[in-house]
Amino acid sequence: MPANVKVNSSVTTYNIRIRQGIIERLGVEILRLCEDMYCEVLIITDEKVSGLYLQQVITNFQNCPKPKGMKIRICELLIDSNEEAKNFTTVTQLLEDMADLGLSGKCFVVALGGGVVCETAGFAAGCYMGGVKLVLVPTTLAAMIETSAWGSAFLNLSSGKNLAGMSFNPSLVICDTECLKTLSPKEYKSGIAEALKTSVMSGEELFRIFERGEVQNNINSIIEGCIRYRAEVSVEIRRKCLGYAIGNAIESLSGYVVQHGNALAQGIGITARASAKMNWCSKETSDRIINALAANNLPSTCRKFTAGEISQALLNGRRISGSTFELAVVTEIGHCESKNINADKLEDVILSGIGA
């Protein structure tokens, strides 16, 4: 069923529209936001997505109803969608290209693609001329869940994943569930891992869908449930994303060869086991999470890297205060919290979560 989620941030309010086929109304939706009779639109996408949707979107802008006399200028830029391209080099090139196109401070940046496109384009939109309007059109399940409601854009540094970031809210988010039909099995599983992570944080109602292995038949309600939960939680709660830190460490250690969803799932499983071993949660809670991962064909541990390698990658990154590392752990379904772990004990905690 179609849904609309309103996000009220400390800075602005924007809508997330979730429905099948809504990408065909993108022109109408964006023109509602345009305050002048001249509208500049820059579509940033990648090669794969451009082949699927770019011409459709451009045609929609050209043919959609508009006030008499209104003129629309549409530009497009392609970027690499690989995780290793989510960096300042890509953003700098985007900014140079935007300036070469002569775009004004009133332009709309439309990010059409997966998480790399949405975050990189979002970062560029936040920088160009002090910030221009951003419209996110996530085309993957992971991006619909991860980039829609938290008003931030992150880039990777040589030291690790997502270490450079900014807070920048979009003006509108369009989630077209029809786009999910074009995803590869790996891309789809990545989104399932993101959704499962959110379900552990949100509570029993959403988590039980994953526990029963009934994701496919409930994907629309899962997307809406995840987005509604994420739209309502505080910044403090956002820091308590189960498996996020360890998953990013695994992904970074692999040189982004390990796919994001697999890395995240491994991080969730390792953290769940460690939470039980350290008596932060019951074994029953940990087992339920591990079983839910298995029910959705997701891994729950890492065999590629040692606990020492993972802990060092974590310490090289963020969330270090003095001699402690801040790790999000689970206490029960629907509740995660941060634990400050001594740096010299972090490897032992990771090891306890890797399991036999």
Image (cartoon, rainbow, N blue to C red):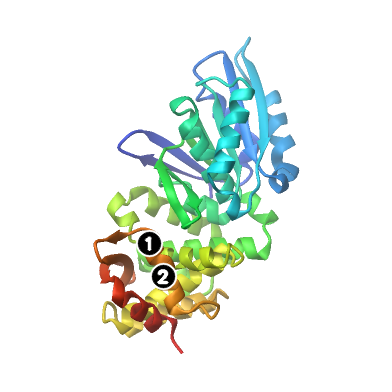
Give the total of numbered labels. Answer: 2
Nearest to N terminus: mark 1 or mark 2: 1
Disc 1 residue crowd, few under 14, some 14–19, many 20+, Cα 10 Å: many
Question: Residue placed farthest to the top in the image?
Answer: 69
Image location of residue 19, percent across then percent down: 56, 46
Q: Quadrant of residue 254?
A: bottom right
Residue 59 in sight from this viewpoint: yes
Which element carries disc 1, helix, strand or loop? loop
Image location of residue 147, percent across then percent down: 48, 48
Q: Against 327, is 224 above or below?
A: above
- Residue 241's disc is 1
Residue 151 in sight from this viewpoint: no
Q: Against 299, is 160 above or below?
A: above
Amino acid under label 1? Answer: Cys
* Left or right position of 267 against 98: left
Identify which residue is drawn at 64% across, 19% down: 72
* Left or right position of 272 against 78: left
- Residue 118's disc is none
Q: Against 325, is 107 above or below?
A: above
Identify which residue is drawn at 43% across, 86% down: 355
> 28 or 304, which is in the foreground?
304
Which element carries disc 2, helix, strand or loop? helix
Contact? badges 1 and 2 (CB < 8 Å): no
Image location of residue 280, percent across then percent down: 27, 77
Amino acid under label 2? Answer: Gln
Distance from label 1 to label 2 (Cα)?
20 Å
Quickly name the residue at label 2: 312
Disc 2 residue crowd, few under 14, some 14–19, many 20+, Cα 10 Å: some
Identify which residue is drawn at 30% across, 77% down: 345
Between disc 1 and disc 2, the foreground one is 2
